[in-house]
Image (tube, rainbow, N blue to C red):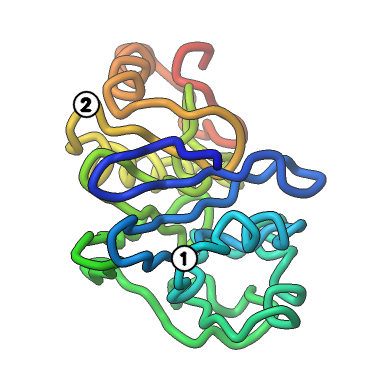
């Protein structure tokens, strides 16, 4: 079982899903056996298999870029799980979401609270899911920098999302992104401080890394 966080709750990480190497997650309460799935990439069967010992309440979609919802049709074919997404991204979901999520919403597995953070920039409806000690960051934040942005205004928006909503979290918080390896809030803050101390062109966007940009 690929447990990456084990405490009052568990987070299971299923890595390298589909052709874009997506990460899918299971947030679970080991006492009540309630769980949520995070994202619906290709090879959704792998994520469902990791959650087989839990009572899954639904699927939380961090954003609706095609690689993060490539398994939606198979999810609906195999289960009747409700899918939740932010309203600003809902139009890109392959089907109609059962629930819309907004900043300030709280979800629960057992007594464990999952806070919904709206972190636009990578997409208009990008979401992060904050727990005590861990953050599932979608494509908002990766080791070394933010997710790819399509314009300078999008880049400024994702930086604001990171610095105002994510960086205030405790520095030991484990950051679990939509692709690749994990990081921590502390490491991200230190890397961003290097970036912020340097001048940058007004049109900076696309793939930006804190240390190399």
Classify residue 103 as left or right of residue 150.
left
Q: What residue sits 68% from the left and 58% below the top?
A: 41
Residue at disc 1, secondary structure: loop
Q: What residue sits 48% from the left and 25% below the top?
A: 143
Which residue is outermost to the right?
19
Figure quadrant of residue 163: top left
Q: CA distance from mark 1 to mark 2?
A: 30 Å
Circle 1 crowding by C-alpha within 10 Å: few under 14, some 14–19, many from 20: some
Q: Position of residue 200 (x, y in %)?
A: 44, 20
Circle 2 crowding by C-alpha within 10 Å: few under 14, some 14–19, many from 20: some
Placement of the N terminus among the 4 image quadrants = top right
| Front residue of 122 and 138 | 138
Q: Position of residue 66 (x, y in %)?
A: 71, 61
Classify residue 178 as left or right of residue 9.
right
Q: Position of residue 154 (x, y in %)?
A: 48, 48
- Mark with earlier residue (1, 2): 1
Which tag is nearer the camera, tag 1 or tag 2?
1
Query: So how many labels did they put on this image?
Result: 2
- The answer to whether 34 is drawn above or below residue 6 in the figure is below
| Front residue of 207 and 60 | 60
Residue at disc 2, secondary structure: loop
Classify residue 159 as left or right of residue 26.
left
> Would you name the residue on which mark 1 appears?
54
Q: What residue sits 70% from the left and 55% below the top?
A: 46
Q: Which mark is residue 134?
A: none
> Would you name the residue on which mark 2 appears?
171
| Front residue of 7 and 103 | 7
- The answer to whether 193 is drawn above or below residue 152 in the figure is above
Q: What residue sits 71% from the left and 40% below the top?
A: 16
């Amino acid at each position: 079982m690929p447990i990456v966080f084990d405490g009052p709750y568990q987070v299971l990480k299923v890595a390298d899903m589909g052709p874009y190497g997506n990460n899918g997650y299971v947030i679970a309460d080991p006492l009540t056996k309630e769980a949520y799935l995070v994202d619906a990439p290709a090879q959704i069967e792998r994520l469902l298999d990791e959650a087989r010992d839990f009572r899954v309440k639904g699927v939380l979609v961090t954003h609706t870029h095609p690689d993060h919802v490539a398994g939606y049709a198979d999810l609906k074919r195999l289960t009747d799980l409700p899918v939740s997404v932010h309203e600003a991204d809902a139009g890109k979901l392959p089907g109609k979401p059962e629930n819309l999520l907004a900043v300030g919403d709280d979800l629960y597995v057992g007594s464990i609270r999952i806070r919904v953070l709206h972190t636009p920039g990578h997409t208009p409806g990008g979401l992060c899911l904050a727990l005590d000690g861990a953050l599932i960051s979608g494509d908002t934040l990766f080791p070394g920098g933010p997710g790819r942005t399509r314009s300078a205004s999008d880049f400024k928006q994702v930086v604001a999302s990171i610095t105002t909503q994510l960086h205030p979290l405790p520095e030991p918080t484990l950051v679990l992104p939509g692709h690749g390896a994990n990081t921590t809030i502390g490491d991200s803050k230190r890397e961003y401080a290097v970036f912020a101390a340097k001048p940058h062109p007004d049109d900076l966007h696309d793939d930006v890394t804190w240390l190399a940009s």
